[in-house]
């Protein structure tokens, strides 16, 4: 028996050595998937990028850092992603045992009572003097499949790529959460600023209404002037509860992101005190693979698809399996462990080639090939989306800065216009409609200025996220 086992193992090693080439060739990620440079960016070969910064170094506001730190620690979606990584790690660990023989222990006892009129029953009575058969066994079964075509190797590769992919999914989720927390905070500061603007404008309208009432008492204006002034004041009054509502909703949204129940959020700074950074370091498009988790995940998905093609292709070829079984067997419990009389053993080895189910196996292979082609297209699409998002953020950063400069001039002009209109109106040299129009224009312009400041801060955050920042 020992010589027989040795021969089978030698044959397996010989076949594995002779047929050591891959049955399928892996497809690499397409190099032409990346442009040479981003749109709206100056041509540069500098590979440094703001995405290389840890989020604690990119965001300098203390309140944002505290909120993000809470989100990274307590966000439920991130914790689910962590569990998915744990599951993928178990699968990868299990795949490492693919080359290890399977060993199963078994102990069994059975009794059989054949018919007295049967051939077995009649012979049983004559041979043993009893009408039943007892059988007691204890043994071990060993089975092993030679990885001739790289099937088990591809299973390991696929499991490892799946494990890495689960990590990239978590990173991608974290970049989104980090960006959403910062954008939510900037939006909160903008709402605070707009609420202050609405309250100041309400006071200004109230002062104007009092002046108009005095002129009405003096017979200089009609009641229509008072009504229009009151209506303009109510516009500002209506804004106040509306903005307070939006503030509470935004605070609740930040609470969900940070894994806590709805509550108020601390603000130790004002929107006007925040500086819009000039982020020029963006690197080159090809570096997105190493920086953007979603692009890296798409690359790993192609590796998983490559492994699946290798696995299904290997199923088309013969599989060499070796099995061995040994132990003790007896008709009587008293002789069950009588060594060596009760010993038994079998060894078998053979090549298994699919025949009738060959069509099914080949179909699975064709599906795996098609899935790999899909993975290539998905990778190209992920790169397109990533490059587009970077280009969008770049043009926003540039054009919002230009818009802000014009809007600041408009606000400055309207503030001066308010002063002049009030002075002229008090001296009877301007109509009340001119004063109300100037106040309405100032309110709208100041609200827009607060909004555009928030958009600038958000655009910087979007650029950081689009380049792959936020998961470090």
Image (cartoon, rainbow, N blue to C red):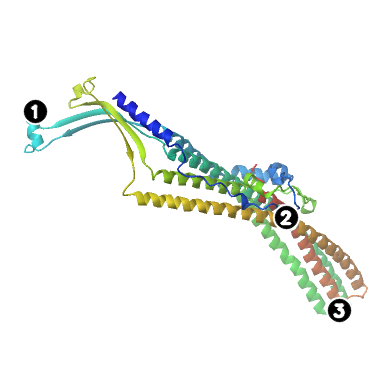
Q: How crowded is mark 2: few (under 14 residues within 10 Å), some or many (20 or more)?
A: many
Question: In the picture provided, is 16 more to the left or to the right than 375?
Answer: left
Q: Give the camera-side residue of 150 and 388.
A: 150
N-terminal-most mark, 3 or 2:
3
Asked if residue 260 can be seen in this view, the reply is no
| Residue that mark 2 sits on | 394
Q: Name the residue under label 1.
A: 127
For label 3, the SS is: loop
Decide which of 9, 272 is in the foreground and name it: 9
Image coordinates for residue 307, horizontal then vertical, percent = 48, 44
How far across and how far down the image is residue 206, in percent? 81, 67
Residue 221, numbered circle:
3
Of residues 269 and 236, the one drawn nearer to the viewer in this rendering: 269
Q: Earlier in the sequence, mark 2 or mark 1?
A: 1
- Residue drawn at x 65%, y 48% is 286
Q: Where is residue 329 in the image (x, y as percent from the top left)?
A: 22, 26
Q: Which of marks 3 and 2 is in front?
A: 2
Assign a secondary structure to mark 1.
Answer: helix
Residue at 69% across / 59% down in the picture? 244
């Amino acid at each position: 028996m020992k010589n027989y086992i040795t021969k089978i193992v030698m044959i397996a090693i010989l076949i594995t050595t002779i047929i050591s080439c891959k049955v399928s060739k892996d497809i690499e990620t397409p190099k032409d998937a990346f442009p040479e440079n981003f749109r709206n960016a100056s041509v540069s070969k500098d590979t440094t990028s703001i995405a290389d910064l840890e989020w604690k170094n990119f965001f300098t506001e203390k309140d944002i850092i505290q909120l993000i730190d809470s989100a990274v620690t307590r966000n439920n979606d991130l914790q689910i992603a962590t569990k998915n990584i744990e599951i993928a790690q178990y699968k990868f660990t299990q795949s490492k045992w693919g080359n290890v023989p399977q060993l199963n222990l078994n102990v069994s006892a059975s009794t059989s009572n054949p018919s007295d009129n049967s051939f077995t029953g009649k012979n049983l009575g004559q041979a043993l003097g009893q009408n039943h058969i007892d059988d007691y066994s204890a043994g071990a079964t060993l089975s092993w499949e030679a990885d001739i075509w790289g099937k088990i190797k591809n299973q390991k590769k696929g499991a490892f790529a799946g494990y890495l992919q689960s990590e990239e999914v978590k990173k991608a989720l974290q970049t989104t959460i980090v960006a959403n927390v910062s954008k939510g905070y900037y939006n909160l500061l903008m709402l605070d600023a707009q609420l202050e603007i609405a309250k100041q404008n309400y006071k200004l309208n109230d002062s104007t209404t009092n002046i108009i009432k005095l002129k009405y008492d003096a017979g200089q204006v009609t009641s229509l002037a008072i009504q229009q002034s009151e209506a303009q004041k109510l516009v500002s009054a209506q804004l106040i509860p509306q903005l307070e509502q939006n503030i509470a909703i935004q605070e609740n949204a930040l609470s969900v992101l940070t894994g806590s129940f709805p509550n108020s959020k601390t603000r130790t700074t004002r929107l006007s005190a925040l500086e819009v950074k000039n982020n020029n370091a963006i690197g080159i498009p090809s570096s997105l693979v190493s920086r953007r988790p979603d692009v890296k995940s798409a690359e790993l998905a192609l590796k998983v698809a490559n492994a699946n093609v290798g696995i299904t292709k290997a199923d088309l070829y013969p599989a060499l399996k070796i099995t061995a079984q040994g132990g003790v067997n007896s008709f009587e419990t008293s002789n069950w462990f009588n060594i060596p009389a009760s010993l038994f053993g079998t060894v078998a080895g053979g090549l298994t080639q699919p025949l009738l189910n060959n069509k099914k196996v080949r179909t699975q292979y064709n599906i795996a090939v098609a899935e790999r082609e899909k993975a290539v297209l998905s990778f190209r699409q992920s790169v397109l989306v990533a490059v587009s998002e970077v280009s969008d953020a770049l043009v926003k950063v540039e054009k919002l800065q230009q818009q802000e400069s014009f809007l600041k001039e408009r606000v400055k002009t309207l503030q001066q216009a308010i002063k002049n209109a009030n002075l002229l109106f008090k001296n009877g040299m301007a109509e009340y409609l001119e004063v109300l129009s100037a106040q309405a224009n100032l309110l709208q312009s100041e609200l827009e200025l607060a909004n555009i400041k928030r958009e600038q801060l958000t655009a910087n955050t979007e650029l950081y996220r689009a380049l792959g920042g936020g998961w470090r």
